[in-house]
Amino acid sequence: MRREESRRLSAWGRNVSGSEITCLFKERRSRKDGLIRRRVRREVEKYLSRRAQENLATNPRKMAVFAQDLIGRSINLDGVFERRELDLLFSFLGPVLNDIAPGTCLDVGANIGNHTLYFSSRFANVVAFEPNPEVFQLLSFNVRGLETVSVQSVALGDGSHKALLREVDGNLGASSLKHQGLGPTVPVSVRRMDDFSFEKPVSFIKIDTEGFEAEVLRGADETLKTHEPIVVFEQLKSEFREGSTPAIQLLQRLGYRICWIGWPGRSGTGGASKLVGKLIGALLGRRFGVYFGATVPPRTHPMLIAVPQRFQAALGVA
């Protein structure tokens, strides 16, 4: 062996048996793989591991998520997506829980089943509707073994027909039958809620369909009139015209009162606006909660609560 080769081999060290080791190929590191970045990565991994153990302690049920999706990331961090809003919602509904718990809960736009699982411990029956075939596979897996939960691979609307669901990369929960975008489209079936029969009276409906809520409600006219369920639904800021939306107006014509979860008067939806809202709330004493007023603030509402006449006195919105 030539002297220069001997020096090169010895530079890479020796293994425990004393034989020489040759490095044949080294990884190429970019500036992104610097010391600070690796340190941050290790701290993030430790934090996520700790959060996973904490979440397992409160919710040991195994759940599958899309790793790169917004809802999946939130579940990894908090155990339940929108846990704060859901806990607040059911605290608010406390006076009527004994009336609605024996009935059927409909989860319209169930996604992978985050809300479905939350509802399953609070209602005698839960029926989850999710039209996206790939998402439906995870929903079916996540509710496996729950005899009180059933799933339907259809979208709900105001008629029976075929439609195209526009996906949103990185946030499948924002996929829409109504709004256009750049993501791929998926053919789905649409049916009316009134076309389904349920084992127990419908006492609670959650609707998160990215701007398609009014169509869902128009196809649920008989269900709403017959059962008078509590309706929890999302509304986007873009849906508001002249201080209201078609979905809100439809429910109000049926005698519902509309409450909202959040802060009383904040109208922005961006990260900076949320931070300002929290600071103002801390200074002025306004707190995250359930609010009721003559009109609903025109902003994006992840959770509006429509209260039927039979529960309005008990919930303080008569």
Image (tube, grey):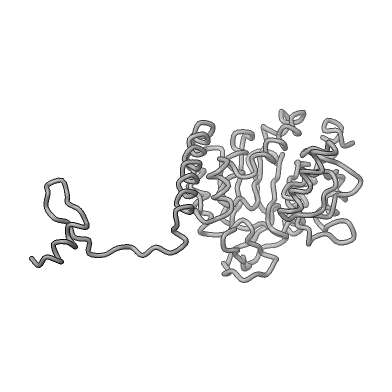
Nearest the viewer among 42 and 4 is 4
The residue shown at (56%, 45%) is 75
- Kindly indicate the quadrant of the structure image that contains residue 149: top right
Q: Quadrant of the C terminus?
A: top right
Residue 227 in percent (x, y) is at 76, 41
Residue 139 position, x and y percent, is 53, 49
For the point 72% across and 37% down, which residue is it? Answer: 89
Q: Given the current orientation, which residue lies at the most extreme left position?
A: 1
| Horizontal side of residue 259 vs 210, given as left or right | right
* Rendered image quadrant of residue 92: top right
Count up the numbered dots.
Answer: 0
Residue 301 pos. (x, y %): 76, 51
Q: Is residue 118 above or below residue 223?
A: above
Which image quadrant for residue 121?
Answer: top right
> Nearest the camera: 51 or 178?
51
Q: Left or right of 80: which side holds 309?
A: right
> Residue at image x 47%, y 61%?
32
Considering the image in quadrants, where does the N terminus appear? bottom left
Residue 163 place in picture, x, y as percent = 63, 67
Residue at coordinates 75% horizontally, 45% vertically from top-left?
Answer: 231
The answer to whether 150 appears left or right of 102 in the picture is left
